[in-house]
Amino acid sequence: MASMLDSFKTGKVQKPTDLTRKIEVIGAGLGRTGTMSFSAALEKLLDGPVYHSGNMLISEEESTAKTWSQILDPDADPEFVKSSLKALLAGYISVTDTWGAALTPELLELYPDAVVICTLREPEAWWKSWFGIPINAVSPWQLKVLKFVLWPVPVLRYSPAAQENVWRRFPKHYGIPRGLPNSKDYIQYHIDWLKRIVPPERLHFFNVKDDWEPLCKILNVPVPDEQFPRINEKAAMKELDEAMMKVVYARWGMITGGVLVAVGGVLLSRKLI
């Protein structure tokens, strides 16, 4: 079975082959809490594919990216959100990272037998890591610039809207003023919110530093005789960012090159006439 990590390395989403599989674990932890390592561990323990937020960024399907940007909108029709999620997640055994976490209420309804696991990290370390990712540190005006820069790029053109919508959705969940995360306290807001909305018997917290045992206990599966996956998320995201920027540069190169050719053609035709 191709893994989530394989998708990031190859730049192509490895789609599920068994569409009868359903979400067994709702990964409700925010990004930068070890969600990649957590996803890899789940794929090993449950023998199935995991949908990580990064899947959208490397998706080859324009419709998938557009749908994510739409369902993350806090004003979207609830039934549209749930039906879209069900289609997007068909065949996956878990959904993890920030975007999935933002849709925890809908996922709870769709998958009543799934457990909810929130990955944890020390708040100060989380905040430093979170703010170290460029897309997480953009201001509203920078997001507008990013929308313009990515507009000609298929799939990626929807990521700024998705990012904007997710940070409209979370404050609404938490009951705080709208805006991007601005302190280490954000992770505690998230934990408190989960405790309010998730039945206690379904809610679990897990730190990837604690290795296999607590996770296996939650899932009631044997502890594997191998090391817990340790994925360097910062390095993986940097690699992904660089790959995406190559696509952006290439697309803008085509546009500017096309404009220059068109202008040159007009000037040449005028000279010949």
Image (cartoon, rainbow, N blue to C red):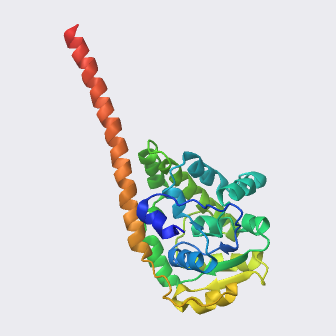
Query: Residue 162: where, in percent of width, then height?
Result: 57, 55
Residue 74 occupies quadrant: bottom right
Relative to 96, residue 153 above or below: above
- Image quarter of the C terminus: top left
Residue farthest left in this picture: 271
Image mark count: 0
- On screen, residue 262 versus residue 268, left or right, reads right
Relative to 199, residue 270 above or below: above
Residue 206 appearing in the image: yes
Q: Which residue is at 58% across, 83% downward?
A: 120
- Image quarter of the N terminus: bottom right
Relative to 220, residue 74 above or below: above
Q: Which residue is at 72% across, 81% downward?
A: 203
The one nearer the camera, 183 or 128, is: 128
Residue 175 appearing in the image: no
Q: Which residue is at 71% across, 58% downward?
A: 86
Query: Residue 69: where, in percent of width, then height?
Result: 60, 52
Query: Residue 136: where, in percent of width, then height?
Result: 48, 65
Q: Which residue is at 63% across, 50% downward?
A: 67
- On screen, residue 195 versus residue 130, left or right, reads right
Query: Residue 250: where, in percent of width, then height?
Result: 34, 45
- On screen, residue 35 versus residue 239, left or right, reads right
Relative to 224, residue 235 above or below: above
The one nearer the camera, 199 or 55, is: 55
Residue 97 occupies quadrant: bottom right
